[in-house]
Image (tube, rainbow, N blue to C red):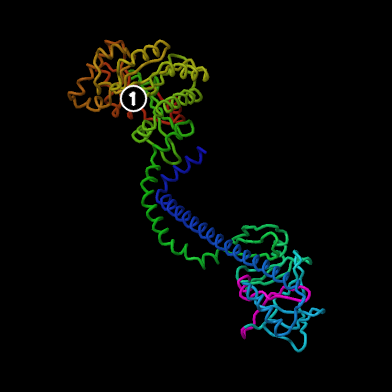
Amino acid sequence: MNKIRYWLLLKMAEMPRFFAFGIGLLLAFALVLGALVATVWLDQRRLSQQHEDTLRTFQKVAAESTELLDRLVALDDLRCSEAGLISLNSYLLGTRYLREIGLLDDERRLTCSTALGALYEPIKGNYPVHITSSGAELLVNVPLTMSGKKQSAIIVQRPRVNVVVSPYVTDDLYASADVVWLRTRAGLILLHARTGIEQSSDMKVRVARQNATRFVWRGLSYELISMTPGLDVVLQTQRSLFTIVRHDMLLPAFLPGLLLIAALAIAAVSPYVQKLGRLSHRIRFLCDDAHLMLLYQPVFDLRTMRPIGCEVLARLKEGDQTWPPDQMIPAIMSQGLERNFDHAVMRKAIHELAEHLPQIDQDKFSIALNCFPQNIEASRLIPLLADALEECGRKDFEICIEVTEHSLSSELITEVQQLKAHGFLIAVDDFGTGYSNLRTVTQLSPQILKIDRSFVYELEDNTVRSNLIPEIVRIASAVNAYTVAEGIEKIEQVELLLSEGVPYGQGYALGRPMNINAFINFLVGEPQRQ
């Protein structure tokens, strides 16, 4: 998860516009998807309601036809006479969904009806009789002429009598679904299929397997199969997303608004994406060995011009980007990672130097480590440095902790004393630029005072600032410390520093900060300078 988060933050830094537009487009897509889901949900609700209303109506039709047929079958005086037909019409007037009553002979031939009157010859239609699962006898899709118009009708019959369901009811039934099925004792039969709908054997199989209403997605379409317990009619409808969107104006109506929202989102998230792309949001992933790049600047004995140690300088490597101190330090401090950073630098520097630096037979090799003031904690640094030295097995390393002059305070005295008691050196860095006085320096009692580069820079011009170097040397002598000059950029400055009593120094004129391999080559191949 951390790797994914870091990768996203890094990409935001590299491509802020891409992410801003991406977030806007993603929001637009989410809104479109939401509108599409809402559209489909509303369509499904409308279709479900339509199916329910149709099945409820047909349930009433079934109940009404059953009740009427029961009453008619119970009569003994059913005749095709004028009086008999008038009597049948009176029964018909009490119904809502039935439009015609017919009388049949023993061979189930139509002898008369309320619409046709008495027939000269009985009519025997060649229409199969379907016995439904509930036992009703139906003739389906029978063409009849009503009010001068040919219509398809459903006829429910019993011995001696039948009733015709209103074609308007039948039309509503057929219009409510893509496919209308009828459950019979012989199996499932097709009542009606909407024009353009090719009912497949798979559709029939799915309906035959169901015993309750079912809604299911099938690819980019959904299918609704509706049924009611005790009712032999089953409705089946398939709706594709394309059909829904084409016939529903909800999504097209929302589209301009969604695009406007996406544009506003891009404008709103752009500053946030740029903020997330800052180094401070990734710095916690970089304070480790994999991203630490250490440089080593040699420190020289100006009298012999031999290196006696080095100062460790840290950079952060992120891909092809190298972050210098003026950019990485504020980021580290903004996230409270000073301790993590310092400890990572200390461990890596000791192990890296121990692995590459040959054993030194005489004296010791000084390793100067910069430390944030708040991290001068003896209880943490002592075990950290001791463990690192013990792991690498080097007895010839001398660790020096550097503290900048402006951070000197009485709170550091106890911590520094404990570090010194365990054999670690203390150096005051950038000395001469802060506000420390002789009393503070005396209490701290460092072993090294590092003269700020600004004094060395003006050394040849004999300025007031350069004339303070002897005073710094006297302060160092007073606290039993020695001095190291920083920022030696001209070889001529070496003799001037020696004449002022400064025995040690570092700077570009003597040796630049180098990676470990270049630093080791520099030490091994460094000739003695006179």
Residue that appears at 21% across and 23% down: 466
Relative horizontal placement of residue 248, taking residue 113 as reference (left or right): left
Looking at the picture, tell me which residue is in the foreground, 254 or 163: 163
Looking at the picture, tell me which residue is in the foreground, 36 or 418: 36
Residue that appears at 63% across and 64% down: 55
Residue lying farthest left?
464
Mark 1, residues whose alpha carbon is within 10 Å: few (<14), some, or many (≥20)? many
Locate the C terminus and report the quarter of the image it occupies. top left
Question: Which residue in the protein does label 1 denote?
Answer: 506
Q: Relative to residue 328, is residue 213 depicted above or below?
A: below
Residue 256 position within the rendered picture, expressed as x and y whole percent measured from the top left? 41, 62
Relative horizontal placement of residue 214, taking residue 498 as reference (left or right): right
Residue 201 shown in magenta = no
Looking at the picture, tell me which residue is in the foreground, 156 or 450: 156
Residue 210 position within the rendered picture, expressed as x and y whole percent measured from the top left? 70, 58
Q: Amino acid at mark 1?
A: Gln
Residue 153 position within the rendered picture, expressed as x and y whole percent measured from the top left? 67, 77
Q: Please give the range of residues in magenta.
A: 147-173
Give the structural element (helix, strand or loop) at label 1.
Answer: loop
Q: In the picture, residue 482 is in which quadrant?
A: top left
Q: In the picture, residue 170 is in which quadrant?
A: bottom right
Residue that appears at 28% across and 14% down: 441
Q: Relative to residue 206, is residue 448 depicted above or below?
A: above
Looking at the picture, tell me which residue is in the foreground, 306 or 259: 259
Residue lying farthest right?
106
Residue 352 position within the rendered picture, expressed as x and y whole percent measured from the top left? 48, 26
Q: In the picture, residue 438 is in which quadrant?
A: top left
Relative horizontal placement of residue 496, taking residue 310 as reference (left or right): left
